[in-house]
Image (cartoon, helix red, strand yellow):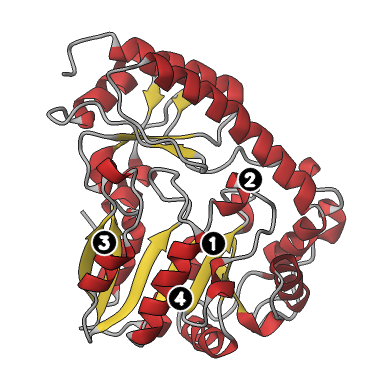
Amino acid sequence: MGLSPYMEWAKSRPVARLDLAASNLKACTIDDLPGAREALELSGRNDEGYGPLLEAIASRYGVAADQIAAASGCSGANFLALAAAVSAGDELLIERPAYDPLIGAARLLGATIVRFDRPAADGFAIDSDRVQAAVTPRTRAIVVTTPHNPTGVTIPDETLAALGRIAARSGAILLVDEVYRDVAGACGAPPAARLGDAIVTTNSLTKSYGLSGLRCGWTIASAAITHRIRRARDVVDGTGAFPPDRLARLAFEHLETLHTRGREIVGANLSRAREFLGRRRELECTIGDGPLIFPCLSASATADAFAARLFERYETAVVPGRFFEMPAHFRIALGGDPRMFDEGLSAVEAALGATEWG
């Protein structure tokens, strides 16, 4: 396995007819973005990011343009933020369970990975005292996701502010991946970065808006941290691709419409998931605000066998919990077409009635 076993699996797994594993929002077509055909240009200036796009992001989140660094998707933004803060031998403190590519980025940078737990028994909430206890003089970054990947649980602002203060006292950054935040709440809600100067928010147009093909991601941070992130990009990919930047700028003119579309899709699927979980008493699941759920089969079970039988018998995919260090769990994404999602949950329910996987 490589630096990120989950991403390697996600790119190589067989295609499922009913895909509850893919975490992107149902993709937009070019006709979902009015003016997209006319806006397409092949070249232009975007050395530090396309200026009109940076201004649009800044305006949406109530910050200055010099606090925005462009990146290739949210994963690219996460990597650039960590590359700007962490050197080989430094410590990176990350939540558990965690989104695997964040751990992979730390490995690639040569950081020492330290963990703090978000216990299932606590509804996957974060205890700031537990985080503080894990910090050492070598800590240079603390990493969290909100809504949490894989559970969809949102971190309260007061907790994020407390974590930001811990990071600031330690000379570290707090990296907050908010890629699911908009679809879980208000469009353009204030980013975590506004809660403290040591906080870096990352986001993109992918998970909340269905525009993964544009690879439009960004960081929001203080101007000083943003400058360091931009310099990290100098040696990664230099600049972004101009045509997607132009289309991403156009998307910000229609963000409210795209946000409504995303909320309707996730809302319908979340309602169906609540009904499903209400019937399946053998599953334990904390339901958050984000477009993910992370049911647990039982403390003694493994979801690998269940996921394999689900795919073989019912052509349906979920993500085994081993990719999040919790093998009894499996992740279901709520961003797919509602008709497909409904059929997929019916397949999961049918598979739960079998005994061969247990």
Question: Which residue is at 62% across, 52% downward?
Answer: 182
Please determine whether, in this image, residue 105 is positioned above or below residue 96: below
Going from N to C along the chain, the mark reached first, 1 or 3, is: 3
Q: Amino acid at mark 1?
A: Gly
Q: Amino acid at mark 3?
A: Leu
Residue 299 occupies which quadrant of the picture?
top left
Please determine whether, in this image, residue 357 is positioned above or below residue 144: above
Residue 112 occupies which quadrant of the picture?
bottom left
Q: Amino acid at mark 4?
A: Leu
Q: Amino acid at mark 2?
A: Gly
Residue 39 position in % (x across, y down) = 84, 60
Measure the C-alpha gap from mark 4 to mark 2.
23 Å
Disc number for residue 3: 3
- Which residue is labeled 1 in the image? 73
Disc number for residue 210: 2
Going from N to C along the chain, the mark reached first, 3 or 4, is: 3
SS at mark 4? helix
